[in-house]
Image (tube, rainbow, N blue to C red):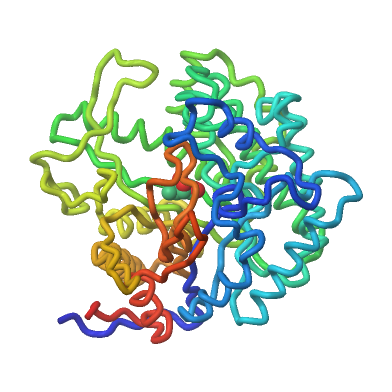
């Protein structure tokens, strides 16, 4: 039995959602269509044919959901603002909605952690080129400024862009996310740059607004490990790190793109001439903290000649990585390796390479088998273990000197898991999509006891 391990005072115990995944109410209160409405309504795009039209109906049921958070002792809620609700000049109903939500959180002692962009770009902007068009960056800066003005008096925690890497990778290279482009590597890196620039412009607007509070980026980061002792694997492990991690962290914290990945891009797509003078200074505006979405490490194997990159991600075999995992590694129900030690490695590395930036875990979670009992109880012991082990890994990072601000589990609710539809349940709270009933899972109750104690204890 492990001893009880305390968390720092003021630790944020949170859960995360995003607007399109939970809100529904897509045609209400002046909301305009987003790229995800378009994409999810395109036949064949979403497994099971789902859309976000209704989702968890959180737009209407938020009071009940906030009460549940309170019941679970959570003191933070990470959610995103739907830009399409705040897009039409003169339309205030979207602002009124988020005013109420924010006030409702504060009344319950829950800190709002607000993401400005979690992928639901207004379709009207996509029609003008979306994130491929540099003008979208300025539209985002204006939108951010409006949000700071409306909510900045009450929101302490702001996040600019969620997972820029996934936006480019799945939306422009693999065609698996809106807007659904495929094999457009130049598009991908253009979008990366514009998203980073949008981040920097939002930070500038935040400082100019005079709001108190803190702002940062929320990238998904993955520690990298070579699949074997072969130097070629070590080489691609570093290279892929340049693609996934350094491409975002270097500009934000050092004001430059990593030379190695820049050279790899330029070899394939030509000069990155969409990077203008002064852009990197904008991107490198000092931030207050870093949101980290952590799901899994990447174990890398060299595949010489493969395109666009000469590597692939494998499940580790006979090599003991520094994360201490080999084959036989436990996986979530969707096959994602569960490697809590990867989180410790990742955070220690961020601190070593980029300085003592305070870290908020903005996402971490998985899909697990769940047993629903006759009385309505939902048993999900693997999620409980997952939460315990990742919080222990976070404490291990803190013991190494990393400043940890909090942990927001993905997700508060089962929800619309993008291309994968409604089958993949990441929630602490189960949603019955027929009745919209909420059922608190066992893992959520466990998480709630940790939040109440501000300490890590074994699950009973
Ligand atoms: C992340 C997304 C989040 C959710 C989780 C499972 O990539 O930010 O919206 O889909 O994965």
Q: Please state the horizontal and vertical placement of residue 189, each as a whole percent of the image.
A: 55, 26
- Direction left: furthest residue: 318
Side (left or right) of 396 relative to 425: left
Q: Please state the horizontal and vertical placement of residue 12, each as a whole percent of the image.
A: 50, 73
Side (left or right) of 303 relative to 426: left
Q: Is residue 220 visible?
A: no
Residue at screen point 77% across, 66% down = 211
Residue at screen point 14% across, 35% down = 228
Q: Is residue 198 visible?
A: yes
Q: Please state the horizontal and vertical placement of residue 208, each as a whole percent of the image.
A: 81, 57
The correct choice, above or below, for 80 with respect to 306 in the image is below
Residue at screen point 44% across, 28% down = 261
The correct choice, above or below, for 67 with respect to 386 in the image is below
Side (left or right) of 167 relative to 147: left
The correct choice, above or below, for 347 with respect to 173 in the image is below
Q: Please state the horizontal and vertical placement of residue 160, each as a whole percent of the image.
A: 64, 51
> 88 or 137, which lies in front?
88
> 128 or 36, which lies in front?
36
């Amino acid at each position: 039995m492990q001893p009880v391990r305390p968390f720092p005072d003021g630790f944020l115990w949170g859960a995360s959602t995003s607007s399109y995944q939970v809100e529904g109410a897509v045609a209400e209160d002046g909301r305009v269509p987003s790229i995800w409405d378009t994409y999810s309504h395109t036949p064949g795009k979403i497994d099971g044919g789902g859309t976000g039209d209704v989702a968890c109906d959180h737009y209407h049921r938020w009071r009940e959901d906030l009460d549940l958070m309170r019941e679970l002792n959570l003191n933070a809620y990470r959610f995103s603002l739907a830009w399409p609700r705040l897009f039409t000049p003169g339309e205030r109903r979207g602002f009124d909605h988020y005013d109420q939500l924010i006030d409702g959180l504060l009344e319950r002692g829950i800190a709002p952690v607000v993401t400005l962009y979690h992928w639901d770009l207004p379709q009207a902007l996509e029609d003008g080129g979306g994130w491929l068009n540099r003008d979208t960056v300025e539209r985002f800066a204006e939108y951010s400024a409006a949000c700071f003005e409306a909510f900045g008096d009450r929101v302490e925690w702001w996040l600019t862009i969620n997972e820029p890497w996934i936006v480019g990778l799945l939306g422009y290279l693999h065609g698996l996310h809106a807007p659904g482009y495929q094999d457009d590597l130049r598009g991908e890196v253009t979008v990366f740059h514009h998203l980073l620039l949008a981040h920097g412009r939002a930070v500038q607007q935040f400082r100019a607004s005079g709001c108190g509070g803190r702002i940062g980026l929320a990238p998904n980061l993955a520690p990298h490990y070579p699949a074997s002792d072969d130097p070629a694997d070590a080489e691609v492990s570093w290279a892929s790190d340049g693609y996934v991690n350094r491409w975002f962290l270097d500009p934000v914290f050092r004001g430059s793109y990593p030379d190695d990945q820049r050279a790899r891009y330029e070899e394939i797509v030509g000069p990155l001439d969409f990077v203008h003078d002064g852009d990197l200074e904008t991107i490198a505006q000092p931030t207050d903290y870093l949101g980290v979405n952590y799901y899994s490490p990447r174990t890398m194997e060299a595949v010489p000649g493969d395109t666009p990159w000469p590597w692939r991600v494998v499940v580790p075999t006979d090599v003991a990585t520094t994360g201490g995992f080999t084959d036989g590694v436990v996986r979530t129900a969707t096959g994602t390796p569960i490697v809590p030690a990867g989180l410790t490695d990742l955070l220690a590395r961020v601190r070593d390479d980029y300085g003592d930036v305070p870290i908020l875990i903005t996402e971490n979670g998985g899909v697990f088998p769940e047993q629903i009992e006759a009385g309505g109880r939902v048993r999900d012991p693997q999620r409980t273990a997952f939460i315990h082990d990742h919080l222990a890994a976070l404490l291990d990072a803190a013991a190494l000197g990393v400043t940890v601000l909090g942990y927001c589990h993905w997700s508060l609710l089962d929800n619309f898991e993008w291309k994968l539809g409604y089958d993949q349940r990441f929630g602490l709270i189960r949603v019955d999509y027929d009745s919209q009933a909420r059922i608190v899972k066992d893992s959520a109750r466990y998480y709630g006891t940790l939040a109440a104690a501000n300490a890590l204890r074994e699950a009973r």
